[in-house]
Image (cartoon, rainbow, N blue to C red):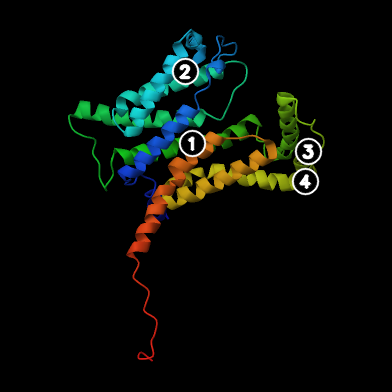
Amino acid sequence: MIERLRKFLSHFHPRPVAAWELLIMRVLFALVVYKTLPNAGQIYDTQTSPNGIAHFVDLTFLAADGVYPALKIAMAAALAIYASGFLLPLVLPFILIAHVMIRTLFNSQGWIHHGVQMVSLVLLAQTLVVLTFLVYRLLKKRPFPLTGGRSMGSYFLFYSQMAIISIYVVSVVSKVDRSDGQWFAKSHYIGLHVVKAERDRYYGKLHDPPPGDVPAARIMLANPNLTRLFLGAGVLLELLAFLALYGRGAALAFSLSMIVFHRSIAALMSIYFHFNEMLLVIFLVNAPYWIVLIFRKSRAAPPPPAPATALDI
């Protein structure tokens, strides 16, 4: 039993990754990070409800004349360098700090937008990886030891995936903790939040027809056990998210399942996690790898046997 467990756990480690895979990931992730930067009109000159580091730092200096536009240009330049793969120990800490400051100020206005934290967490993981390699080289006077065909990119990808997966596992813990263990028993009341989401969307636009009966909410409230089963499946998926680190196939299966679940929640509650889905596609689905793998296997496959002729018969 112990040997089987040891063999199972041995699969959870960084794996070799091609340079072209990392290049595609960095380019796509750089675009996502830039997309998460708010418009100039969303950089507020107050932080009435401090969140995170805003408890210790006054971030309203970002709203001073010319500061945010200049910072956004600097972010674009740093992200371009990041995408190229050069100077990562220099540009990644800058991108991380700037991103956290910008999004923290946005989240210090009395409401919190939960759709971007995963991006900051992946930036943190990648920053820690490149700085670890740099500090090791400076202290030990030799490169970080790499075996089994691994590179720094192997750790870069592995800990990016781990950062993504940790969001889902922590989500399960928070559900249970904040509900005092009653989340599953009362999950059908999420139907009320579906109604609330419909009302919020109406009052946010006012030009849509006023919401009447909400079929999804009515079904959830009328069928509590069915609702618990559906939402419980999502929670189980989040709880077992760590299995995505077992290998490329497991990462693909988990990420596609999670994207389907995100889409289902979006259809029911109009709650969108577009950036979560983007990071799942970039770092866990990793479609370019599978396309290249299928192409190479098709090229390596033996030719089909020639059809029988009259002479053969």
Q: Residue at x 36, y 89 (%)?
A: 312
Amino acid type of the residue tagged 3 in the rendering: Val
Amino acid type of the residue tagged 1 in the rendering: Ser
Distance from Cα at disc 4 to Cα at disc 1: 31 Å
Residue corresponding to mark 1: 166
153 on left or right of 283: left
First in sequence: mark 4 or mark 1?
1
Q: Looking at the rendering, which quadrant does residue 130 occupy?
A: top left
From the viewer's side, name the closer residue of 198 and 13: 198
Per the image, label 3 sits on a secondary structure element best described as: loop
Distance from Cα at disc 2 to Cα at disc 3: 39 Å
Label pair 1/2, CB-CB below 8 angstroms: no
For discs 2 and 4, the disc positioned in front in the rendered view:
2
First in sequence: mark 4 or mark 3?
3
Amino acid type of the residue tagged 4 in the rendering: Asn
Q: Count neighbours of disc 4 (C-alpha within 10 A) and say few if under 14, some if 14 to 19, many if 20 or more.
A: few
Q: The N terminus appears in which quarter of the rendering?
A: bottom left
For discs 1 and 2, the disc positioned in front in the rendered view:
2
57 on left or right of 112: left
Residue corresponding to mark 2: 101
Distance from Cα at disc 2 to Cα at disc 4: 44 Å
Residue corresponding to mark 4: 223
216 on left or right of 56: right
Residue corresponding to mark 3: 214
Amino acid type of the residue tagged 2 in the rendering: Met
Per the image, label 4 sits on a secondary structure element best described as: loop
Please provide percent x and percent y for residue 9.
40, 48
